[in-house]
Each structure stands twice: as structure tokens, then as C-alpha cells.
Image: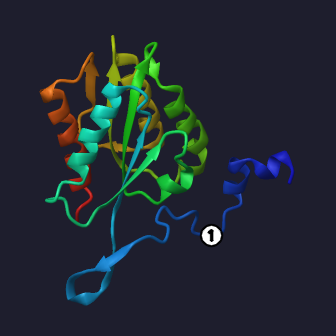
Amino acid sequence: MTARRADPRHRRRHRPAGGLSRRLPGRAALGAGGTLAAVPTLLIVHHTPSPATAEMFDAVLRGATDPEITGVDVVRRAALAATASDLLAADGVILGTPANIGYMSGALKHFFDQVYYPVLDGTRGLPYGAFVHGNLGTEGAVRAVESIADGLGWRRVAATVQVAGSPGMPDLRACWELGATVAASLMS
């Protein structure tokens, strides 16, 4: 395969009529009247190398999977393992990263670098939220994540949770609410 044919931008220009669908075959559940209905998927893409970011991730996950949130499938992917296919199959996304030297983690940046062009047309309007942890400031990392999400045409449905230092109970509660809010936005 030539380098030009391997370039995702080249493949997109030659997409069959109708373009690349954002919904890939996924789970289905019985809807009203016994008919099959697609189950919306929330994708959580995270890079959680420190105990603080892992604690925040756990709180986001607890919120997204709260028993009162029904009919939403929650999928977790480490940023270095998440793919464009994961994102195209999602109906919403939560992004989690530490703030490293005033920027998002290299792992989350790598995720964005890998998926940006393949999902650019197929994820416009995607609901999203984010959480960021830093030992000092988080502003640069938040600005970077929101800038890329804006470039993709995503729609933020919850305030970004920013925590500097060890997350306290109010911070973890905000993370829980982030997960619950984004997941609930997908309920039909």
C-alpha cells in the first residue's frame, strides 16, 4: 500500500456515498413495544498514571454507572489504547488527563493525534466532558482539550472538573456529577 493510500485523509475523500457512519453495530435492547433499540454508548478515554487522577477517574466511572442511569453502556479505554473506531461507536465521551508541564498528557495528545482526521466528520455534535488533575495549574491542559474538542465540533455538556493537588470530597463529588451528567445526557 502506498503512503498516499494509507493516509486517512485520502480514504475519506473516496468514501462511498453516505460517508462513514458514526454508529457502528453495537448492543441493542428491547425498547417500547418489544422492538429492538440501540443502547447509547459513553466512552471514557483516560490517562490516569497518578493516584489522584485514578481517584478522579473512579469517581467519574461511579457517576456514569450509577444505578439510576439506565440504558447507557459505559466503555473505558486508556488513552494509548483508544481508537477512532471506539470514538465513532460512542454517543458521548469523557476525557481524563493529568496536567503535565501546563498541557494535557502525551497519552491523551497521542489519542487526539490518532483519531482527529478519521473522526472529524463523523463526531460533530458529540456530547463530551473532561476532568483534569495537576499539582500546580490545570488551565493550559483544559484549554488544549477544549480547543481540540471545539475543532472537532463536539458539544460540552458538563463543566470541566479541574483539581490542583490532592482531590478532596468536593472534587470527587464533582467528578461523580461529571460522569452522571454526561451519561444521563445520553439516556433516551
Regarding mark 1 in the picture, which secondary structure is present there? loop
User: Which is more toward the observer, 31 or 169?
Assistant: 169
Q: Quadrant of residue 170?
A: top left
156 horizontally vs 116: left or right: left
The picture places residue 21, in percent across and down from the top left corner, at 52, 65
Residue type at numbered disc 1: Ala
Give the residue at x 20% y 64%: 70
Does residue 132 appear in this view? no
Q: Quadrant of residue 100?
A: top left
| Residue density around tag 1, few if under 14, some if 14–19, many if 20 or more, within 10 Å | few
Does residue 46 appear in this view? yes
Q: Quadrant of the N terminus?
A: bottom right
Q: Please say if 15 is above or below 42.
A: below
Give the residue at x 23% y 47%: 62
Give the residue at x 40% y 17%: 140
User: Which is more toward the observer, 10 or 116?
Assistant: 116
The picture places residue 23, in percent across and down from the top left corner, at 46, 65
